[in-house]
Amino acid sequence: MDLSYQIVRSSRRKKLTITVERDRTVIVHAPASASEEAIKQIIESKRQWLFEKINHSQKYEALPHAPGKEVVNGESVPYLGRDYLIEIAETKSGGVEFSRHFLIPAAQQAKRRKVLKEWYLSRAAETILPRAKRHAKEMGVAYNEAKIVDNRYRWGSCTVKDHVHFNWRLIKAPMFVVDYVIVHELAHLLEANHTPRFWNIVRARVVCADKAKTWLKEHGQILEEEL
């Protein structure tokens, strides 16, 4: 059976890694010097593992309809685990405002989706990054940088340079899910792989870790939509 994959090269990368995204895409992160033949050999050596990952129950196909919602009166969008109605109306600030529902300025009609996404990004940075700092301090770990990123198929990541990245879409999930993803990535600073020790670290910090994993499995596909 053919196994398709994408290669992403970087001059800063020293080791080759392979990831299987939740949409079943296989991504090979390779050093700039890695040859096509060497990559092919590694892929072949991991063929069985890759097919197991691709067919894992947490992987899924793309949504059968266009992603995202219309930003119009009466529509609702998620924030911290709940759906809130949208109202198109003038706001005191001239920007998006939130108080039991979303107020989207009528003056921003031509770019409603853009301004709402910007609001999410801002709120994600204000909410997630301080929590990452607090969790790291209490876990006794240190990262070099934490930032919010726009990565549709990953909730978070911990890089080889000890940078931790968090998907802005997490701000649409309940706080216990946000904390689970934060702790999950910080735990990689103590244990690189998903070993029993790794999961013990996560569960010791987030008692509802299994509940959070289940929530992401059940709601993740909708969460990944742009809005």
Image (cartoon, helix red, strand yellow):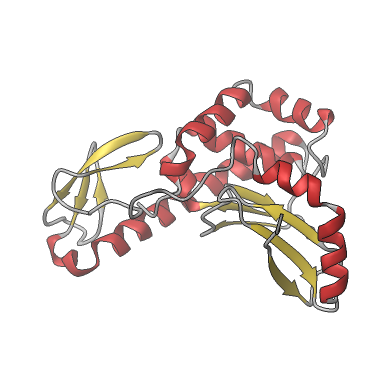
Query: In the rendered view, would you say 69 is above or below 173?
Result: below
Instruction: Specify whether 50 is left or right of 214.
Output: right
In the displayed structure, 8 sits above or below 137; it is below
Residue at left 13%, top 61%?
106
Front-most of residues 199 and 152: 152
Horizontally, residue 207 falls left or right of residue 139, namely: left
Identify the image quadrant of residue 100.
top left
**Residue 163 seen by the camera:** no
Instruction: Reply above or below: 207 against 103.
Output: above
Residue drawn at 46 percent across, 50 percent down: 62
Answer with the quarter of the image where residue 52 lies. Answer: top right
Front position in the image: 124 or 30: 30
Pick the residue in front: 126 or 119. 119
- State the image coordinates of residue 82 (x, y, percent, origin top left): 34, 33
Residue 174: image location, x then y, percent: 45, 33
As drawn, which residue projects farthest toward the top? 207
Question: Which one is nearer the viewer's eye here, 97 or 112?
Answer: 112
The percent position of residue 10, horizontal first and vertical second, equals 75, 74
Relative to 32, residue 144 above or below: above
Q: Quadrant of the N terminus?
A: bottom right
